[in-house]
Amino acid sequence: MIFLLPLSIITHTYHTPKQPESIVTIENPTLIPDLQLEKIRQLFPHTSKGIIYLNHAATSPMSTRVLDAMTGHLQDRSSGKIETWFSDLPQIEKTKILVQQLVHAESHERIALTGNTSDALNIVVSGLDWKAGDRILLNDLEFPANVYPYIPLKRLGVEIDVIKSRNGCFTVEQIEVGLTSRTRVVALSAVQFLSGYRADMASIGRLCRERGIHFIVDGIQAVGAIDIDVRNMKIDAMAAGAQKWQMGPQGTGFLYITDELQNRVQQKYVGWLGVETPWNFFDYDQPLAKSARRYEGGTVNIPGMWGMHAALGTLLEVGIETIQDHILALTQILTDELQKIEGVSLYSPLLPSERAGIVTINLPKNSNPQSTFESISRKNIQISLREGKLRYSPHLYNTRDEMLAVVEATKDALKKSCVPSIDRS
């Protein structure tokens, strides 16, 4: 594979192998070789400033390629040709092609560019023909973005069933037991934002397809970190903001939707670019676009889209399987080493097949989570404090040495924040 071509000559002809029908346990994930890794790190200037960034589950830094792409577009809009619309249109299509290749969609016409995960989910959820008594299956680990779109449906008499997780995880069997004859949708994050649990998407997708249930996925914590194949996983719709593991700008993302589900969605809003021939301005009776473009409606975030294109191009150039392997190797180091700290327990899964880029730990009972987090932050290490737990989320440019340094920083911070227990015997 040609590695790290100049941004100006990156094209959209990337190829990645098919995802197997079921998740395969990766027992010995490998790191990206040092020479290749150093070239990747040059795209992220913060790495040369002593900053260890392990907070990609919140938001990713933008590479120099992303910055250059956005800056070039904005300069053109400011002091160049200014009217860039007709050169932006092909770039929109190229960005959709990159998304298609990243998630193994059947066509880039199944992709709509959106501002964020919530917008994409609401397009689908609000457009389905719900009936009183219909049911939705969720679980109690979900980030609110994958819950709130369904709550307004209660006023229509739709019921929401919730699976109770166990230690940050749940099983395919729990989902199967939770299904009823009236279940219309299984709504699920491919990777859970706090525990980092990676669902067996292929098995759940097959189960839903066999029962005639829509499988709607929040992919924001998965796409860009692990290899997602929407067809083999039988995903009917997937929404994913690009600012996390896709390493794109904030305010960018996408919706994938099958043609079959699109035909069932009655849009609640339509814009002028969502019709079949937008430039026939006075043909108000024309049909909606046959592709997922119908959901974009009006002008997308063009500067952000240029950045998103550059970000996805980099991921595909390195190779999503290579990135997945690297991330799993890093999370394995964190998983192994953090558990050696006295009083710490793992909230994330042990198995690589159940993990993606997130490792979360429970802190000792006598520790102060906030002061522990602040102590780590003072060492130029960026992680997350969520629900009293520490969350670590490395990406493709992070190194083994950084993982070990973060573990040591965590150990030192806990020594300072833990209150000695009082012997009351």
Image (cartoon, rainbow, N blue to C red):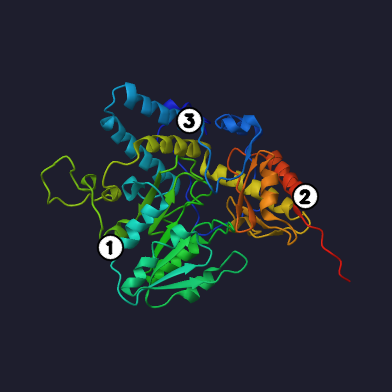
Q: Residue furthest top?
A: 79
Residue 260: x and y in percent read 30, 60
Query: Quick one: label 3 or label 1, which is nearer the N terminus?
Result: 3
Q: Name the residue: 49% across, 76% down.
A: 177
Tag shown at residue 65: 3
User: Few, some or many C-alpha atoms within 10 Å of disc 3 (few <14, some 14-19, many ≥20)?
Assistant: many
Q: Quadrant of the C terminus?
A: bottom right
Relative height, residue 74 to residue 392 (above, below): above
- Viewer-nearest residue: 246 or 45: 45
Q: What residue type is disc 1 on?
A: Arg
Q: Residues within 10 Å of mark 1 (few under 14, many from 20)?
A: few
Q: Residues within 10 Å of mark 2 (few under 14, many from 20)?
A: few
Q: Secondary structure at mark 1?
A: loop
Whole-number angstrom distance, CA of label 3 to CA of label 2: 40 Å
Residue at x 29% of width, y 30% of height: 87
Give residue 242's quadrant in the image.
top left
The kind of residue on which mark 3 rests is Arg
Between marks 3 and 1 in the image, the one whose residue lies nearer the viewer? 3
Cα distance between the residues tagged 3 and 1? 39 Å
Query: Does the image show residue 35?
Result: no
Q: Is residue 347 above or below residue 60?
A: below
* Left or right: 195 as drawn, with respect to 285: right
Picture layout, residue 75 above or below residue 299: above
Mark linked to residue 264: 1
The local secondary structure at tag 3 comes to: helix
Q: Position of residue 160 (x, y in %)?
A: 42, 72
* Label of residue 416 in the image: 2
